Each structure stands twice: as C-alpha cells, then as structure tokens.
Amino acid sequence: MNRTTLMFAAALAVGAPAGGPIVVAQSFTPKPPTAADWAALARLPDFNGVWEIGLGGGGGRAGAPPPAAGGAATGAGRAGAGAGAGRGRGGGAAAGPALTPDYAAKRKALQDAAREDNETANCLPQGMPGIMGQPYPMEFLLTPGQVTIVIEAYQQVRHIYTDGRPLPADPDPKFHGSSVGRWEGDTLVVETIGFSPLTQLAPNTPHSGKMRIAERFRLADPDTMTIETTITDPEALTAPFVSSRTLRRHRDWTLAEYICEENNRNSVDQNGKAGINLAVPGGSPKK
Amino acid sequence: MTHKLKATVRSALATVGLVAGFAAAASAHHSFAPFDMGTQKVIAGTVKAVEWTNPHIWVWLDVPNEQGGVDAWGFEGMSPNFLGRRGWTRTSIKPGDKIAVTYRPLRDGKKGGMFVSTKAPDGRLLSMQGGQNPEP
C-alpha cells in the first residue's frame, strides 16, 4: 500500500461514524501512464474507430439483405408487438437462455403481462447486455489502462479498466455494471458484474444480483470484430448463455449525437400501453 | 391513382424484402404496437415540416380534407443518425414539397403512421431502409 492509499484509508476511517463498519480502502492505486505505456498501445490489436453490427447501410449498401435472425441476444425486453422483430442482429445465440424454474416463471409472467412496449420508449437505455446489440455504431478508444466504448444509441459509455485492478467486491448496481479487462494475446477479455435490476438478461428475462458477463473481443480480420458474450447467473441460468455478434469497422464514419429526449414522441405508460404524441409542430392547420 | 402514385406503390413493394432489417433497426427504441405493420397506404400532400431529430425523424404533411381545408398528418421515420449514413440529409424532403408518402397506419385511426418511403421531387426513392436510391 503506497502513501496515497494510506492517506485515503485514513481519511475514510476518520469520516466513518463511531461504531460503523470499518471501510477498507481498495488496495489498487492507478499509476499515471508513462511514455512507454502510451507506446505499448501500438502493439495491441487495432480496435480504435467506429464499428457497427452487421446491418448493411453506408451509401450503396442500402440493398444489403437483413442479418439472419438469431437468438434473443439483443437484451433488454422488447415487449409486445416488437418482440419478434429485433432479434439477433449481427449474430446472436443459437438458442435462448436456459432458465431455472424460478426465472422461467418470471419470464412467463412478463410475457403474459404483454406490455406493448418497454421503457426504452421513454428513453431509458437498455443497459447491459442489450446496449451492445443496438443498430447504432460504437467507438472503441484505447488509452493506457482503459478501453472505452462510446455507444451512439442513447449516447452511452462503458469504461473497461485494463490496468490490473480487481473487480469491486460489492459494487453499486449500474446499467453497465463494473468492468475490468485484460489482454489474452490478441483477445480483449472483459468481466462485468453489478447490474441494475432495470436491465434484463434477455428480452422479458430478469437477472439476479449474481449475473456476470464475460466478453471476448477480437479482430477476425482488419475491419471485422467478433464479440463472444457469455452470461452466467447461478440464480437465473442453468447453463451459461453464450451469444456472438460481428461488427464491421467504418473508417469513414464518426459517431453522431443521440439525445433521445430531443423529440421523443413515443411513450409507454405504467400499464405497458404504448403511446404516440401527434402534437403538430407549429400548431394544427386551419380546418 | 396517378401514374406517379402507382410508381410509388411499386417501389414500396419492392422494398418489402428489406423490412426485416428495417424492423430490427426501428425496434431499438420502441415497439411497433401503435402501427398496423401488415398494412401499407399511400397519402399525398404538401410537406408542412420535417423534424430531423432523435430518436426519430417526423415528416408532417398537410393533406387536403373534404371540408376544403387541410389536415396535418405525422409520419415517424428512422433516426437522423441511421438515415444520415444511408444517403438522407435533413433537406431530402423540404417544407413545400408535394409528395406521396407510403406508410403503415396508426392502429387507432389517428392521422399518421410509420413512414415507409416516398419519391423525392427529383424522382429518387427515399426509403427508411436507407438510401436515396434510383427507382428500382
């Protein structure tokens, strides 16, 4: 434990209420990057840039066939009429998640509720794992000790620490969880824990507080990335739920702004009823 | 139905094979519950406004009604981000343009729907699958 950490621990101890829990400072202390750390990035696989799951598009490719439907690997509940429409973009799982009886019942209850839409209609982002399957690009940024994924959909960001720190012991639940990564040869291996209960393991499928997501990112060729995602959850799953997707790099793209609240005319109410706001811009015309 | 309208309908039908991809992209934000996805209609009018905004563009059309006035119809499209990478710009359709919009109607019968395609004033097909494509 170096000096900074000790001071941090001391500050916490002083601030703790009498008789309260003893706070143990995390033993990991990030180091400032050196010139060698920056230079070492050049030896890593070239992940930098803008990637999108296989949708077609980009100028003349508008006529490309749609991606084959896969499993329900695109995450956060796509309820109601949209349920069958958006699965397995750019890949997917061969089969859906193998659920424990408890969680199969939870899923059935959600399916039976037949909500017409989910909270994304109100601009709430999917969180993990669904946010990684959106039909919008993502930008990967490699800096010393960190891989950052900027996700255009809902203007989200994931921080993956590759500086050797451990996963937090008791993280607050978050939409994207807490992630650490390491390089195994040319593969970036990411472990993520600590997900908000507002995210879903798969459509209509909740997860427990013990869900873990392991992702393996690698380049299949210079402009093709594959991501293999393995979800484990001892309370929800009887077997790991594995899916994969393929991303294409678009060297000539930049990420665009995505402020969902800018002009969101869609909505879903607490009963799951979908709505549309048809207020005419500038007011209604004279009848 | 005018020749122009028939051509628009034909173009729309030619894109049916792409609907699955379109559906995948469109469903990122919301479901299709409000729309009758099995029906396509065509309506002609004058563009009143184009909202080139996230999470969806909206094209507003002034459509003549039987009382001699006009009704405003609203059509939801994809996002400017999605369309901007596929040949559209915020001026692909402009206020004042006279266009016929192919759309999937709202189930509740209100004046609007999901934008499928239109033919731009210069004759190119503007579809939600992307692209300002030549007439197929």
Image: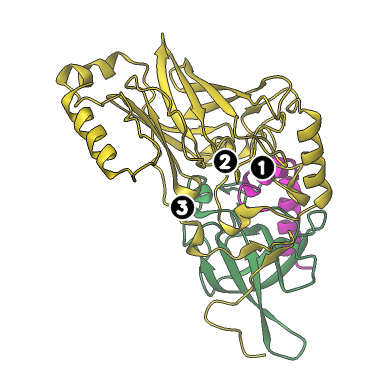
- Mark 2 is surrounded, within 10 Å at the Cα level, by few (under 14), some (14 to 19) or many (20 or more) other residues, namely many
Return the chain for callout 3.
Answer: A
Identify the coloring.
Answer: by chain
Tell me if residue A241 comes above or below residue A260 in the rendering. Answer: above
Label 2 residue SS: loop
Q: Which residue is mark 1?
A: B24
Extreme-front residue of the structure: A19
Q: Amino acid at mark 2?
A: Pro
Extreme-top residue of the structure: A185
Q: Which residue is mark 3?
A: A258
> Which chain is green in the rendering?
B
What is the distance, in whole Å, between disc 1 and disc 2 at their CAs?
8 Å
What is the distance, in whole Å, between disc 2 and disc 3 at their CAs?
13 Å
Residue A81 visible in the picture: yes
Q: Quadrant of the N terminus of chain A?
A: top left
Corner quadrant of residue B102: bottom right
For this rendering, which residue is in front, A210 or A118?
A210
Disc sitting over residue B106 in the figure: none
Q: Amino acid at mark 3?
A: Tyr
Q: Residue at x 75, y 56 (%)?
A: A116
Return the chain for callout 2.
Answer: A
Q: Amino acid at mark 1?
A: Ala
Specify whether residue B25 is painted magenta.
Answer: yes
Label 3 residue SS: loop
Q: Colour of chain A?
A: yellow
**Lower sequence index among marks 2 and 3:** 2
| Discs 1 and 2 lie in a common subunit | no
For the residues labelled 1 and 2, say whether their Cβ atoms are less than 8 Å apart.
Answer: yes
Q: Which residue is mark 2?
A: A135
